[in-house]
Structures are given as structure tokens and as C-alpha cells.
Image (cartoon, helix red, strand yellow):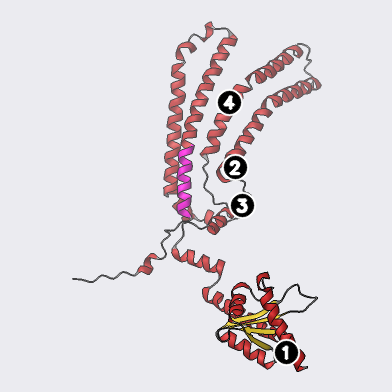
């Protein structure tokens, strides 16, 4: 049977892993986010027709006042420039009052449509010039890419369905449109406005459904574009956490420095409590400066042996008390005061050491 061998390293560069939080943050800083241009369009269409519906009485009132103003001043106008200037200012003011609320509402909706998709985001990365934007090869790739095909199909669907909705609405109103001359002006205008409103809402709802589908696709494509390979994740981890070997050497160096400081503190100790072979704890107590005795060094095994050797060099008293030595080692870290329940035992040891010192003196 033929033997097949696969080099798994060939698959190490495949981008199969979801993006890490750091990768997502970097993409966001570059302006790369999942968003659909169809969402603002759909919301603006719906909001525009809803605003026109809600503000219809206000719009009608101001337009009627504008027409009345023109009709009232037209007979007395002498064709001079000051009169024309006055009429122009009045028209500008009235139209501004009509258009301003609508534009303000549409601006708010446009802003919210972006915030809903990507949140608050300010970046200048997209404004920076890039050669790929003017590179003909990159341009051809974009034209014949999957994204370009989807955009074309989406545009074609919009044109076809929006055209159908408009045609369907017009077809449904042909009967009364043919008899529009028989209606009163206000009734005819009301019918036309209602028809336009229904058509606009149908188009807006269709665009909203299309926007939801497009947003799903854009998010799917975005997640695919920021996927990472296992090697990239490992490299990022190394950058964030540091190389494991370097971190190991740092920790080793820190332990050496801590041990060195501990050995330097042994000459200041008052007593070394041992068990007597496995544990050694150096205790220091300065009345008036300390609230309780403090452990300045501790260790077991070889470190305990070094503590005892260092203590012997500086003639520090050593007391064998296995239970106390084990309790101090388990409950108290270097530099900490001993716990309250060990006060009596440690006080007894210190009293014994002080009596020995007085005898030697």
C-alpha cells in the first residue's frame, strides 16, 4: 500500500480562527467594521415619509401662507428690485421653516443608523491615501470580485422591486386618477398625498428588509475578512504576553533577587525557628517600632539550610520548634507580621533568646 505523508505546516497559515479582541480593535481603528449602506437608505426613506405625514398640517399651513403672501403683494409690486428682494426673503423664510424640521429629523435618523450598526467611531484612517485605490490591477479585482457581483445583484433587485411597487401603486389608483377632474381640489390633493405616502411606505419597508439581509451578509463577510490563522494568534499572544522563555528567565531572575534580599535580611533577625531540618523561619521584633514580630526570611529544604548557615555566620540564635516552624511557614509570608494566634508561642521563643543573650553578656 502506498504511503501518503502530509505536511501539516501547509495548513498552519489558513485563516480558520475567529478574530481576537485585539484584531477587532485594530480593524476598528482602521475603519474596518461590519456595516451596510442600505440601512441608512431604508431608514431615511421611511423616516422621510413619516415626517411628511406627521408634519403635513404644518407644511400645508406655511405653504398656504406663502402663496397668500405672494398673491397679496403681487398686484402692488412695481417690478423693482427692493420689492423682489422682500418677496425672496419671505419665501426663503417660509421654505426654511418647512424644510428645516424635515432635514433635522433626517439628519438624526442618518446619525442613529450609523450608531446602531457600528457605535460611535471616529477615524482618519480611511482618509489617508493608499496606492491600492489607484492601482489598476486592484481596481479590476474589485470590479470582478464576489462583493461587486453581490452589489450588482442587490442594485438590480432594488430597481426591479421598487419599480414594481411604484407601478403597482399607480395601477391601483388609475381608476380614480382618470376621474380626478371631478373631485374638489382639496380632496384630489388629499388622495394624491395618501397614494404617495402608501407607495413611499411600501418602498421603505422593502428597503428595510433588503437592508437587514445586506447587513447580515456584510457582517458575515467582515467576520471572514478578519479571521486569523493559528500562527497569527500565537504571534499575537507572544506580543501581548511576551516570549515564554523570556518570561521564564524574568521570573527566575526575580526569584534570585528576592532570595538575595531575603539572605541580606537574615543578619537583622532575632531568632531562627527550625523543625530542625526541613524548615527555617527568621523572625525579627523591635519593640516600639513593630506592632508584632515579623518574618524576614523563610524556606525549606536547601533554602532552609542556607538560612541556618547564614544565621550561624552572624551568630543568630536558632531554636528548634517543629510545630511553630511549620505554622509560621504556612501562615506568614516574608515581610508580614505573624498572626495573632501564634503570639504566645513566638513570645516564648523570643523570651528564651533574650534570656540567653543576658547570660552571655
Q: Secondary structure at mark 1?
A: helix
Q: Label 4, on which residue?
A: 50
The answer to whether mark 1 and mark 4 are in CB contact below 8 A is no
62 vs 24, nearest the viewer: 24
Mark whose residue sits in front, 2 or 3: 2
Q: CA distance from mark 3 to mark 4?
A: 35 Å
Q: Label 1, on which residue?
A: 356
Q: Label 3, on which residue?
A: 127
Q: Secondary structure at mark 3?
A: helix
Q: CA distance from mark 1 to mark 4?
A: 97 Å
Magenta span covers which residues?
211-225
Give neighbour class at mark 3: few <14, some 14-19, many 20+ (Cα, 10 Å): few
Mark whose residue sits in front, 3 or 4: 4
Please tell me whether residue 130 belongs to the stretch shown in magenta.
no
Q: CA distance from mark 1 to mark 2?
A: 79 Å
Which of the 4 image quarters holds residue 321?
bottom right
Q: Earlier in the sequence, mark 3 or mark 4?
A: 4
Q: Main secondary structure of the magenta part?
A: helix
In this rendering, the answer to whether 174 lies above or below 220 is above
Amino acid at each position: 500500500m502506498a504511503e501518503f505523508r502530509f505536511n501539516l505546516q501547509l495548513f498552519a497559515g489558513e485563516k480558520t480562527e475567529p478574530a481576537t479582541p485585539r484584531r477587532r480593535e485594530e480593524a476598528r481603528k482602521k475603519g474596518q467594521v461590519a456595516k451596510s449602506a442600505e440601512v441608512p437608505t431604508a431608514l431615511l426613506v421611511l423616516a422621510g415619509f413619516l415626517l411628511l405625514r406627521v408634519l403635513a398640517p404644518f407644511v400645508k399651513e406655511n405653504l398656504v401662507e406663502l402663496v397668500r403672501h405672494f398673491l397679496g403683494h403681487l398686484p402692488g409690486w412695481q417690478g423693482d428690485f427692493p420689492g423682489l428682494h422682500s418677496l425672496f426673503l419671505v419665501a426663503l423664510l417660509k421654505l426654511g421653516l418647512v424644510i428645516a424640521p424635515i432635514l433635522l429629523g433626517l439628519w438624526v435618523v442618518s446619525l442613529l443608523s450609523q450608531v446602531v450598526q457600528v457605535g460611535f467611531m471616529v477615524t482618519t484612517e480611511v482618509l489617508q491615501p493608499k496606492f491600492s485605490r489607484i492601482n489598476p490591477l486592484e481596481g479590476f479585482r474589485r470590479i470582478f470580485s464576489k462583493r461587486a457581483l453581490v452589489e450588482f445583484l442587490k442594485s438590480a433587485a432594488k430597481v426591479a422591486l421598487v419599480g414594481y411597487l411604484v407601478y403597482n401603486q399607480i395601477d391601483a389608483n388609475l381608476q380614480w386618477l382618470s376621474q380626478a377632474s371631478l373631485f374638489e381640489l382639496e380632496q384630489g390633493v388629499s388622495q394624491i398625498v395618501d397614494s404617495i405616502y402608501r407607495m413611499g411606505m411600501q418602498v421603505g419597508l422593502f428597503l428595510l428588509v433588503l437592508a437587514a439581509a445586506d447587513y447580515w451578509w456584510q457582517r458575515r463577510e467582515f467576520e471572514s475578512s478578519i479571521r486569523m490563522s493559528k500562527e497569527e494568534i500565537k504571534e499575537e499572544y507572544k506580543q501581548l504576553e511576551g516570549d515564554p522563555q523570556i518570561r521564564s528567565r524574568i521570573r527566575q531572575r526575580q526569584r534570585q533577587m528576592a532570595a538575595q534580599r531575603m539572605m541580606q535580611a537574615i543578619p537583622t533577625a532575632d531568632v531562627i525557628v527550625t523543625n530542625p531540618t526541613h524548615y527555617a523561619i527568621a523572625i525579627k521584633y523591635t519593640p516600639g517600632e513593630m506592632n508584632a514580630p515579623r518574618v524576614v526570611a523563610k524556606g525549606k529544604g536547601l533554602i532552609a539550610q542556607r538560612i541556618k548557615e547564614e544565621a550561624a555566620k552572624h551568630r543568630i540564635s536558632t531554636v528548634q520548634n517543629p510545630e511553630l516552624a511549620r505554622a509560621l511557614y504556612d501562615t506568614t509570608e516574608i515581610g508580614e507580621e505573624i498572626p495573632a494566634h501564634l503570639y504566645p508561642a513566638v513570645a516564648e521563643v523570643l523570651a528564651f533568646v533574650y534570656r540567653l543573650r543576658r547570660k552571655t553578656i
